[in-house]
Image (cartoon, rainbow, N blue to C red):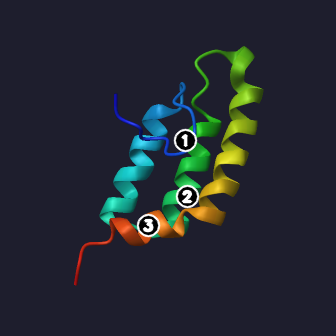
Amino acid sequence: MTDHCTLWPEGWWAACCKAHDDDYLAQVGQAVADTDLLACVATSAPTPVLAAASAVVALVMYVGVRAFGSRFYRKAAPPL
């Protein structure tokens, strides 16, 4: 099993984490990648009942990647 949601449990938002990892690898810009993650997770709930939970998860994940994601973003950068 691949851990796309580093230091976070895999859930219905796992595809969003994979896209975020891909954005980091592509060096699209950390702020852009992090904002895209927020939007993706916030809208990824599989049922309307989980929509509020998805919004909370998205916000917590966003705060985490903004605070701690830079070391992973730098690691993903191709060597010069």
- Amino acid at pointer 3: Tyr
Circle nearer the N terminus (1, 3): 1
Q: Residues within 10 Å of mark 3 (few under 14, many from 20)?
A: some
As drawn, the label of residue 73 is: 3
- Number of labels in the image equals 3
What residue is rendered at 54% in x and 62% in y? 69
Residue 80: mark in rendering? none
Callout 2: few (<14), some (14-19), or many (20+) C-alpha neighbours within 10 Å? many
Counting from the top left corner in percent of width and height, residue 25 is at: 32, 60
For label 2, the residue is 34
Q: Earlier in the sequence, mark 2 or mark 1?
A: 2
Which numbered mark, 2 or 3, is in the foreground of this view?
Answer: 3
Type of amino acid under label 2: Asp
| Dot 1 amino acid type | Cys
Cα distance between the residues tagged 2 and 3: 10 Å
Q: Residue 58's quadrant in the figure? A: top right
Please give the name of the residue rendered at 53% of the width and 25% of the height, measured from the top-left corner: 12
- In the image shown, does 55 or 24 lie closer to the viewer? 24
| Residue marked by disc 1 | 40
